[in-house]
Image: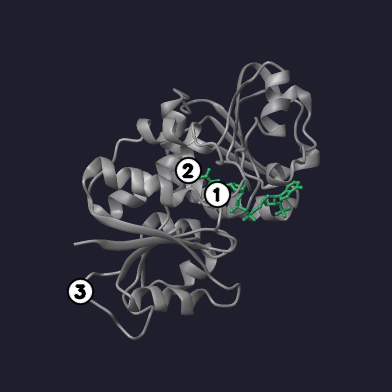
Amino acid sequence: MTVRYGVIGNPIAHSRSPLIHRAFAEQTGVDLDYMAILAPLDGFNATVAQFRSEGGLGLNVTVPFKAEAFALCATLSERAQRAGAVNTLIFPADSRSSDVSSDIRGDNTDGVGLLRDLAFHQIQLKGKKVLLLGAGGASRGVLAPLLAERPARLLIANRRAATAEQLATDFQDLADTQLGACALDTLPAEPFDLIINATSASLSGKQLPLPDALIGQNTTVYDMAYGRAPTVFMQWGAALGATAFDGLGMLVEQAAESFYLWHGIRPQTDHVRDLLKGSADLFGASRLG
Ligand code: NDP
């Protein structure tokens, strides 16, 4: 029997999630229908309710609804609770409750997606100096798994320093490491092993005001965003000698984790990584999810 899933966001037309999930379905033999669903900015809950009433069993959630999805859930995984944001909604198959939120479970797979992609690129975190740029939903989602890898130091830097400081305070209890926060314009002029860009600056092609001294002899820069060409952040790092990666692999890996939550099967991701790289229209809008 065909089961229905989808990704909900605004805008949504350029989402690669349908392509990714259909490729996973083909690989694993799951008979599914996965669609991109545009919700009005003031109509997230109503659109979810409509999808459920039509038999939908789960949704991925992307910009700008991750916080609304969090608020909608009756139960949350520990990682979603920590993140304060939900990118995967799970609806029980045997229930079509008229109260849309009464039995929805929420999870957040962004963190595991990032960690699997870092592992794919053979990037170790244990004992390393890590700089996390940005303090929005994506940073919040990846902080716990990053800290679990026990870097020696993790510094969060944000345009608005107060948001970074709040994040460091909120995750201090998980920190078996030196966890700190600062403003982007007060970054120390010293090298880090790994610099992760979790700001949305790359989506508008803006380079962050970063000191070149952040790049050392063995620095890796990782941008959660991606584009047709390397992002300006990746270009900055590469020009200074760093190894640079974009967030395409994270996108595939977070999707694989959602697929597992829904279907109980963990798909292989290498083939889908290759498929996306070869997808001609992939970067039409540089949107994620
Ligand atoms: P949010 O809107 O929650 O946060 C945006 C962050 O970027 C804030 O810290 C904000 O700083 C900062 N920022 C925005 N513009 C600028 C700028 N011009 N200069 C400096 N800082 C800026 O977004 P998310 O956290 O949800 O997403 C962040 C990025 O991660 C996006 O590029 C998104 O596409 C990507 N992402 C990728 C995923 C993947 O699978 N590859 C998954 C999830 C996200 P301030 O607080 O000061 O406003």
Upstream in sequence: badge 3 or badge 1:
3
Does the beta carbon of the residue at mark 2 sit less than 8 Å from ligand 1?
Answer: yes
Q: Position of residue 209 (x, y in %)?
A: 80, 37
- As drawn, the label of residue 94 is 3
Mark 1 beta carbon near ligand 1 (under 8 Å): yes
Say if mark 2 contacts mark 3, CB within 8 Å.
Answer: no
From the image, tell me which residue sits under label 2: 251
Give the quarter of the image for residue 133: top right
Q: Amino acid at mark 3?
A: Asp
Q: Residues within 10 Å of mark 2 (few under 14, many from 20)?
A: many
Q: Which mark is residue 288?
A: 1
Q: Is residue 289 above or below residue 156?
A: below
The reply to whether the residue tagged 3 has its Cβ within 8 angstroms of ligand 1 is no
Asked if residue 12 lies left or right of residue 214, the reply is left
Q: Which type of secondary structure does the marked residue at label 2 adopt?
A: helix
Which is nearer the eye, 222 or 3?
A: 3
Locate residue 199, reporting x and y percent: 66, 46
Disc 1 marks a residue whose amino acid type is Leu
- Is the N terminus in the top left, top right, bottom left or bottom right quadrant? bottom left
Report which quarter residue 99 is drawn in: bottom left
Q: Which residue is found at the position 43% from the left and 73% from the top?
A: 48
Residue 213 x/y as whole percent:
76, 22
- Is residue 149 visible in the rendered structure shown here? no
Q: Nearer the viewer, residue 112 or 233?
A: 233
Q: Earlier in the sequence, mark 2 or mark 3?
A: 3
Marks 1 and 2: CB-CB under 8 Å? yes
